[in-house]
C-alpha cells in the first residue's frame, strides 16, 4: 500500500496548474448517457473517482476512450444497459447520478442502493422523491432501486435541502422529460452551473442554474458535445491552504476566484494576501495566521470540502477558532489523526474548537477520507520532521498528482511503498521554513 511521506518545513513557492473539477466531471460523464452521439470531455482530472465512473459507464455498455492529456471520448450506443451493479456503486456513491439519465433515456433503471460512507449516512430520498414527482415508479428490492417511467413528465419540485446530487440527478432527468420542470431550493454550487452549461451545449433548455430555482424545458433529443470541465475549486482551496501553512507564495494557474469568494475572504481575514486574476489566483503569506470561526454551508456558504484543510491551518493560528460542520454528520473523523501531529482540538457534536499551537510534529497517521487525508498532508507540510500518511487511496480519489504538484513548488514530499522508520529522524536537523507560529 502506498504512503505519502512529507518532510515538513519547506516553504512553498511557485506555480501549480489546477486540474478539472472532480465533482463536475463525474456528473458531466453521467450526462453523456443522455445522448447517443459522441461526447468529448476535456480537462478531465486523472483521479480514481473518474476511473470508477469510467468503469460504471463501461458496465452500462458505454464506450469510453481515454485519449491522454485529460481528454476522454464517450459514446453511448443503442445497447445501453439499465443496471448499475453493486460492486461499482459501492466503490463510489456519486455514481447515483446515472439514475436520472438512465431513466430519462431508457425509461428504466436498476441501481444498487448506495450505502453510507466515511463522512455520513448520505441519504438519497430527495433524488427518489423528485423522480417520483416526475412520474417514475420506484421500488427498493433486494438492495436495488428499481425505477420505471414510460415517459418522465415535467414537475414542480421543491427540495427540502439544496442537495447537490439531487439537483443534478433531477436536472438530467428533466432535460428529456415531457414539459416543464422547476427545481426549487436547488443547490447553487458552481458544479451545477457547469453541468447545466454542458447540457445546454448538448441542446437542453436549462435556465436559472446557480440560483435557487432551476427551470428546465424538456426536449426530445440531445446531441453530442465537446466540453471543457471547469477548474476544481476544492483543489484550489486545498493548495491555497498548503501555501498559507508553509508561509508560501504560490500562483494557482487556471483557478477561479469567483468560485471561492467566501474562502478567499476567510484567508484574507486570517492574514493572507490573495489576488485574483483572469488566469489564476495568487496567494502570498505574511508570516502569521490569525484565528477565525468557520461554519460550513451549501454554496455560497463555506464549503464542507475545505473544512478539514482549514482545520489543519487553524491548528497553527494565533488564538482559538471554532469550526462548525453543518452539511455532513461525520466529517470530523480525521481530527484524531491531526491530534497525533500535535493539533489541539476539542470537539462537541458538530463543533470543533481549535486552539492554535506553536508547532506540529511529524508522526505516522492514516487518511480516513479524501479531504481529511488532504488535511493531514497539509499539516505534514508544516510539521517538524517526517509525517507518513497511509491509506492514501482516499487522497487519490480526488487529487490529481498531489505529490507531484506539491513537490514542484518546493515541498519535500514523496510517495513510497515502504514504511519510514521515524525513530531515525533527527527532528532538530530537519530543515525548517519560516512557518507561521502562533504567538
Ligand atoms: N441529503 C439527504 N437526502 C438526499 C440527498 C442529500 O438527506 O437525498 C443530505 C446528505 O446526507 C448530506 C447533505 O444532504 O448530509 C448534503 O448532501 P448533497 O446531496 O448536497 O451532497 P452530495 O451530492 O452527496 C456533493 C459532493 C461532495 C460535497 C457535497 C456538498 C460530489 C460527487 N460530491 O455530494 O463532495 O461535499 O456535494 O457540497 O459532487 C468531496 O468531494 O469530498 C465530497 C464529499
Image (cartoon, rainbow, N blue to C red):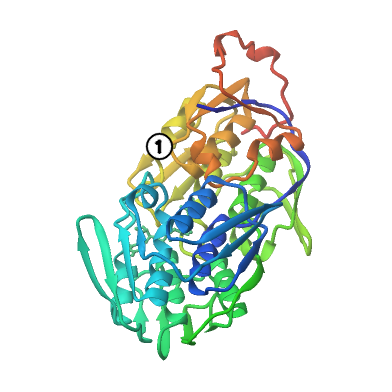
Where does residue 291 sit, x and y in percent of width and height? 57, 45
Q: Give the residue at x 53% y 21%.
A: 363
Q: Is residue 226 above or below residue 204?
A: above
Whether residue 247 is visible, yes or no, is yes
In the figure, is residue 120 to the left or right of 217?
left
In the figure, is residue 119 to the left or right of 415?
left
Q: Give the residue at x 66% y 45%.
A: 239
Q: Is residue 255 above or below residue 417?
A: below
How many discs mark residues in the rendered view?
A: 1
Q: Give the residue at x 37% y 44%.
A: 118
Where does residue 345 sit, x and y in percent of width and height? 44, 36
Task: Tell which of 180 and 300 is nearer to you.
Answer: 180
In the figure, is residue 214 to the left or right of 40?
left
What is the secondary structure assignment of the residue under circle 1?
strand
Where does residue 149 sit, x and y in percent of width and height? 30, 79
Q: Residue furthest top?
A: 424
Can you tell me whether the CB of the residue at mark 1 lies under 8 Å from the nearest atom of ligand 1?
no
Q: Is residue 266 above or below residue 403?
A: below
Q: Quadrant of the C terminus?
A: top right
Q: Is residue 142 above or below residue 401?
A: below
Callout 1 crowding tier (Cα within 10 Å): few <14, some 14–19, many ≥20: few
Task: Tell which of 258 and 4 is nearer to you.
Answer: 4
- The quadrant in which residue 334 appears is top left
Q: Which residue is mark 1?
A: 346
Q: Give the residue at x 35% y 82%.
A: 152
Whether residue 293 is visible, yes or no, is no
Task: Tell which of 126 and 48 is nearer to you.
Answer: 48
- The quadrant in which residue 176 appears is bottom left
Q: Residue furthest front?
A: 79
Where does residue 294 sit, x and y in percent of width and height? 50, 53
Task: Give the image quadrant in which the ligand numbered 1 is located.
Answer: bottom left
Amino acid at each position: 500500500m502506498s504512503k505519502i511521506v512529507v518532510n515538513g518545513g519547506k516553504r512553498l513557492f511557485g506555480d501549480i496548474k489546477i486540474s478539472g473539477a472532480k465533482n463536475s466531471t463525474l456528473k458531466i460523464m453521467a450526462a453523456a448517457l443522455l445522448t447517443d452521439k459522441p461526447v468529448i470531455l476535456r480537462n478531465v482530472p486523472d483521479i480514481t473517482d473518474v476511473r470508477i465512473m469510467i468503469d460504471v459507464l463501461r458496465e452500462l455498455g458505454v464506450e469510453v476512450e481515454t485519449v491522454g492529456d485529460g481528454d476522454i471520448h464517450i459514446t453511448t450506443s443503442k445497447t445501453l444497459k439499465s443496471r448499475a451493479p453493486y460492486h461499482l456503486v459501492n466503490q463510489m456513491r456519486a455514481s447515483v447520478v446515472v439514475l436520472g439519465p438512465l431513466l430519462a433515456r431508457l425509461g428504466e433503471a436498476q441501481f444498487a442502493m448506495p450505502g453510507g460512507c466515511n463522512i455520513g449516512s448520505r441519504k438519497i430520498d430527495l433524488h427518489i422523491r423528485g423522480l417520483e414527482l416526475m412520474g417514475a415508479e420506484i421500488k427498493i428490492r433486494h438492495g436495488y432501486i428499481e425505477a420505471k417511467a414510460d415517459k418522465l413528465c415535467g414537475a414542480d419540485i421543491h427540495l427540502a435541502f439544496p442537495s447537490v446530487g439531487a439537483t443534478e440527478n433531477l436536472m438530467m432527468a428533466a432535460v428529456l422529460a415531457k414539459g416543464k420542470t422547476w427545481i426549487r431550493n436547488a443547490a447553487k454550487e458552481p458544479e451545477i452551473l457547469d453541468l447545466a452549461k454542458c447540457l445546454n451545449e448538448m441542446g437542453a433548455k436549462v435556465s436559472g442554474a446557480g440560483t435557487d430555482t432551476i427551470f428546465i424545458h424538456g426536449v426530445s433529443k440531445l446531441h453530442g458535445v465537446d466540453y471543457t470541465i471547469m477548474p476544481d475549486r476544492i483543489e484550489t482551496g486545498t493548495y491555497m491552504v498548503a501555501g498559507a501553512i508553509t508561509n508560501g507564495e504560490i500562483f494557482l494557474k487556471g483557478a477561479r476566484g469567483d468560485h471561492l469568494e467566501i474562502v478567499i475572504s476567510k484567508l484574507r481575514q486570517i492574514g493572507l494576501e490573495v489576488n485574483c486574476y483572469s488566469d489564476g489566483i495568487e496567494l502570498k503569506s505574511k508570516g502569521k495566521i490569525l484565528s477565525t470561526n468557520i461554519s460550513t454551508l451549501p454554496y455560497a456558504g463555506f464549503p464542507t470540502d475545505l473544512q478539514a484543510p482549514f482545520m489543519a491551518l487553524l491548528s497553527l493560528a494565533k488564538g482559538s477558532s471554532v469550526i462548525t460542520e453543518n452539511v455532513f454528520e461525520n466529517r470530523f473523523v480525521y481530527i484524531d489523526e491531526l491530534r497525533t501531529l500535535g493539533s489541539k482540538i476539542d470537539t462537541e457534536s458538530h463543533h470543533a474548537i481549535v486552539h492554535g499551537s506553536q508547532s506540529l510534529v511529524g508522526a505516522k497517521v492514516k487518511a480516513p477520507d479524501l479531504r481529511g487525508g488532504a488535511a493531514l498532508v497539509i499539516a505534514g507540510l508544516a510539521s517538524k520532521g517526517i509525517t507518513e500518511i497511509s491509506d492514501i487511496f482516499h487522497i487519490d480519489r480526488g487529487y490529481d498528482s498531489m505529490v507531484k504538484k506539491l513537490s514542484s513548488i518546493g515541498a519535500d514530499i514523496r510517495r513510497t511503498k515502504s514504511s519510514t522508520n521515524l525513530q531515525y529522524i533527527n527532528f532538530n536537523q530537519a530543515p525548517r521554513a519560516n512557518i507561521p507560529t502562533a504567538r
